[in-house]
Image: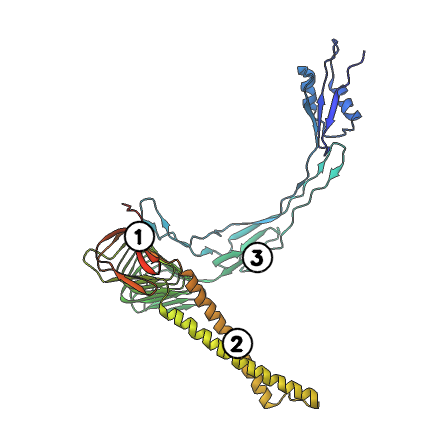
């Protein structure tokens, strides 16, 4: 007695096979071997799911389509990658805590390593898994791509070929799988007459105070754990003042990057970036980016604060009428400077055109008369002037582009006060100024239809 022939359906991509088994109509049962043979007759060579066939047999699954064979997709190998054993995601901003306080202690602009410390491990690419269809046609997987050895300075590659170790201590940076370790100047105490002034090509970390009359300069970042007194501090890439500035009207802080400080009192602070702090007191503060005072105090009391891109604070001024000025946007001088540079660049361009015409005349005479004027003093003077003017025009264009970016960044600048603005505060947006005459809560000052407007943003008790 022969068993009925099950039907087999194979998907178009030849990756799956489904079987439908009819009842035998007799006491005789199907076997896994028989069903496997049926699959072979239907050109299913590999990928047979024996467990599925066994279930059909054990459970008498009739007249129901069951998946009985399955191919495998090729899985390409994973690419090689570097695992960095140091922090590559540094916090550039202070963290606002749930209670409203701001954590200035854990701002981290640089990562330090020690000589002999492992800094990276390379994980090679994997081979991947080949794929196949039911007809035993194989698809080869691609092996994961390998990365070239780590490049940079201040470290070595160990004999195992995958471990990288620092050879010097200092600041470590990573960008696009390039690692550099730079020496850092570290002071484990105060900067005073015993240490002398600091002028360092790199980053400076001071674990104490910077006392009256001292100077700290760095081409990188400056981090000061305690207080800056009446001193000068400049970190071209950024400044972190964990203990703040108590300047006695003599402190100056300068940067092209961002500045973060616990507080700024009686100081002159200027940066092309942003400023984050908890409070300003009787200080002159300028930011080419934004000013944010978002700690528990979050206040500006006395002095003047200007930010090109906007100011956010909890309170401005105080109840006794401290003379406080806040301003955002760009001043008229910036637009005047743009017009002046544009005019100068135009004049330089006209002069350059005349010089180029003179040089063309020399070339024409040389071709017509067969003479050489290459070393003629008049021609050489024109060539030198052409080089000078070309460099000057390029410099003016770069300066003009910088000023235009400032204007663009200031287009939506506003002053947002979360809580109180007190009477007597002077508020300026671009060239327009108003004086606050009555206490205001939760307001925003910004340009509206060409004039300064004051808009309510909803009071918060935080």
Question: Where residue 275 sits in the image (x, y, percent)?
Answer: 36, 59
Query: Closer to the camera, 158 or 214?
Result: 214
User: Does residue 361 sit above or below 127 in this rendering?
Assistant: below
* Cα distance in 3D space between marks 2 and 1: 48 Å
Residue 304 position, x and y percent, is: 29, 63
How far apart are labels 1 and 3 at the CA level?
59 Å
Q: Position of residue 165 (x, y in %)?
A: 54, 54
Dot 1, how many residues are within 10 Å of its Cα: few (below 14), some (14-19), or many (20+)?
few
> Where 138 sits versus 246, above or below?
above
CA distance separating discs 2 and 3: 42 Å
Instruction: State which quadrant residue 262 falls in.
Output: bottom left
Name the residue tied to disc 3: 156
Which disc, if any, is residue 391?
2
| Element assignment for label 1 | strand
Q: Are marks 2 and 3 in contact (CB under 8 Å)?
A: no
Which of 138/192 is in front? 138
**Residue 71 in the figure: left or right of residue 401:** right
Marks 2/1 in contact by CB < 8 Å: the verdict is: no
Q: Which mark is residue 455?
A: 1
């Amino acid at each position: 007695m022969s068993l009925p022939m099950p039907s087999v359906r194979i998907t178009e991509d030849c990756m799956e096979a489904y079987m439908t088994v009819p009842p035998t109509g007799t006491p005789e049962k199907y076997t896994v071997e028989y069903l496997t043979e049926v699959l072979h007759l239907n050109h299913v060579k590999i990928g047979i799911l024996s467990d599925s066939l066994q279930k059909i047999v054990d459970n008498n699954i009739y007249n129901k389509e069951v998946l009985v064979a399955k191919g495998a997709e090729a899985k390409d190998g994973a690419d090689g990658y570097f695992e960095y054993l140091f922090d590559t995601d540094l916090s550039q901003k202070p963290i606002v805590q749930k209670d409203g306080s701001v954590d200035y202690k854990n701002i981290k602009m640089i990562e330090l390593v020690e000589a002999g410390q492992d800094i990276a491990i390379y994980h090679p690419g994997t081979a991947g898994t080949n794929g196949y269809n039911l007809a035993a046609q194989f698809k080869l997987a691609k092996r994961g791509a390998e990365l070239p050895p780590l490049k940079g300075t201040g470290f070595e590659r160990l004999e195992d070929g995958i471990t990288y170790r620092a050879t010097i201590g200092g600041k470590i940076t990573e960008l696009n799988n390039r690692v550099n370790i730079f020496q850092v100047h570290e002071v484990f105490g105060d900067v005073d007459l015993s240490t002398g002034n600091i002028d360092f090509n790199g980053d400076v970390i001071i674990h104490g105070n910077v006392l009256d009359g001292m100077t700290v300069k760095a081409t990188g970042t400056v981090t000061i754990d305690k207080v800056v007194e009446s001193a000068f501090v400049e970190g071209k890439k950024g400044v972190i003042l964990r203990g703040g500035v108590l300047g006695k009207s003599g402190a100056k802080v300068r940067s092209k990057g961002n500045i973060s400080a616990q507080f700024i009192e009686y100081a002159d602070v200027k940066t092309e970036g942003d400023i984050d702090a908890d409070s300003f007191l009787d200080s002159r503060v300028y930011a080419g980016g934004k000013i944010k005072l978002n700690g528990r105090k979050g206040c500006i009391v006395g002095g003047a604060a200007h930010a090109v891109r906007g100011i956010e604070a909890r309170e401005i001024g105080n109840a006794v009428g401290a003379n406080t000025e806040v301003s955002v946007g760009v001043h008229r001088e910036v637009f005047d400077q743009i017009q002046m540079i544009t005019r100068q660049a135009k004049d330089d361009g006209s002069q350059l055109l005349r010089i180029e015409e003179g040089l063309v005349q020399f070339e024409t005479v040389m071709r017509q008369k067969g003479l050489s004027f290459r070393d003629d003093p008049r021609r050489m003077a024109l060539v030198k002037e052409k080089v000078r003017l070309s460099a000057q025009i390029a410099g003016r264009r770069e300066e003009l582009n910088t000023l235009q970016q400032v204007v663009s960044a200031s287009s939506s600048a506003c002053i947002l006060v979360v809580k109180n603005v007190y009477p007597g505060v002077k508020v300026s947006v671009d060239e327009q100024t108003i004086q606050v005459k009555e206490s205001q809560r939760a307001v925003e000052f910004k340009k509206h239809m060409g004039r300064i407007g004051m808009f309510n943003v909803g009071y918060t008790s935080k």
